[in-house]
Image (cartoon, rainbow, N blue to C red):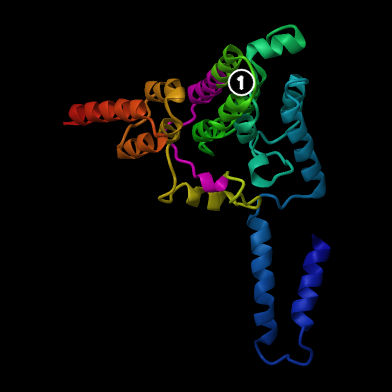
């Protein structure tokens, strides 16, 4: 980084030889000053050694299934519970996001592979360890991330496979059950059921691996930002249990939920949300 800054400084300063009129040098220093300020504000502006440690912490997080004690060992040694360094940009630089969006574990599958069922399961255990060491449960809209991350893609894939219907139904039911388990685990420890997220930050077509935290927060305040309940409703009646779970934890039902119900394309969901909305309107009178 020092070499890059030095080269940039030289190029800016001497790009036009002989032009050293009054104010010119200061004008040429302006972009350098702005560059340095940007680097200073960038959370990734850390030494190579710190980055190596953050990468090692990331590796420990994704390997929690096999070595759960490693995460606690690194936290005891001073690892930042709010920062790790993955390979895909900002989305892998927050340990709780990595936990919220990584593939979860079901008890049956874990027992088949390892012969026992840990309590809690690795995804919940990882979040508990991080929170015990000071991870900020309010930094990102974790409930929204879980609801959005675990959608209908997997379900559609299962439906396209040539397999026994009972087996397909089991896989789909188990997928939804575990998504709700993880969602409930995050909400119980303080994740907001109403904090909005924005699909632009997460969709592969619009993903920006250099997205800053400030820009992420701005995205979550735009008209395109949605609540976890909106996203759950939009997924349709197969996710009715998730809708009910969010409502149980106090998610606010508003007019945007009526729009989400229409987007689900399912009359049953439209009727369900309309009734809930009308009931809320009457109770508010």
The relative height of residue 245 versus residue 191 in the rendered view (above or below) is above
Query: Which residue is nearer to you in this view: 154 or 58?
Result: 154
> Can you name the residue that lies furthest to the top here?
115
Q: Nearer the viewer, residue 34 or 273?
A: 273
User: Quick check: is 70 in the magenta stretch?
Assistant: no
Left or right: where does residue 154 sit relative to residue 219? right
Answer with left or right where residue 99 lies relative to residue 269: right
Q: Position of residue 123 (x, y in %)?
A: 64, 22
Q: Is residue 161 left or right of residue 215?
A: right
In which quadrant will I find the N terminus?
bottom right
Work out which residue is located at the far left of the displayed protein and give it: 285
Q: How many marks?
A: 1
**Residue at screen point 73% across, 21% down:** 65
Q: Which residues are magenta?
A: 176-201
Instruction: Name the residue: 65% across, 30% down.
Output: 102
The image quadrant of residue 262 is top left
Image spot of residue 60 (x, y percent): 76, 29
Q: Is residue 266 left or right of residue 215?
A: left
200 falls in the magenta region: yes
Residue at point 60%, 50% (across, down): 205
Q: Which residue is identified by label 1? A: 124
Image coordinates of residue 264 in percent, x first then y, are 41, 34
């Amino acid at each position: 980084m020092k070499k890059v800054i030095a080269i940039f400084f030289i190029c800016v300063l001497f790009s036009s030889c002989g032009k050293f009129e009054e104010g010119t040098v200061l004008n040429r220093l302006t972009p350098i000053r702005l560059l340095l300020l940007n680097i200073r504000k960038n959370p990734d502006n850390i030494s190579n050694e710190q980055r190596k440690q953050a990468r090692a912490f990331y590796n420990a997080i994704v390997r929690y299934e096999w070595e759960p004690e490693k995460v606690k060992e690194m936290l005891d040694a001073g690892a930042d519970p709010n920062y790790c360094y993955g390979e895909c940009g900002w989305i892998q630089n927050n340990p709780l996001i990595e936990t919220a969006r990584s593939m979860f574990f079901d008890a049956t599958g874990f027992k088949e592979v390892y012969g026992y069922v840990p309590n809690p399961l690795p995804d919940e255990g990882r979040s508990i360890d991080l929170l015990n060491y000071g991870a900020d449960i309010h930094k990102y809209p974790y409930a929204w991330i879980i609801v959005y991350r675990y959608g209908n893609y997997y379900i559609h894939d299962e439906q396209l496979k040539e397999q026994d219907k009972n087996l397909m139904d089991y896989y789909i039911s188990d997928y939804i059950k575990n998504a709700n388990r993880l969602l409930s685990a995050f909400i119980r420890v303080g994740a907001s059921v109403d904090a909005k997220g924005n699909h632009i930050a997460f969709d592969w077509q619009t993903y920006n691996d250099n997205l800053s935290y400030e820009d992420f927060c701005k995205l979550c305040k735009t008209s395109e930002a949605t609540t976890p309940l909106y996203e759950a409703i939009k997924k349709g009646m197969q996710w009715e249990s998730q809708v009910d779970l969010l409502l149980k934890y106090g998610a606010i039902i508003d007019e945007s939920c009526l729009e989400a119900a229409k987007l689900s394309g399912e009359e049953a969901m439209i009727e369900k949300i309309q009734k809930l909305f009308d009931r809320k309107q009457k109770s508010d009178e």
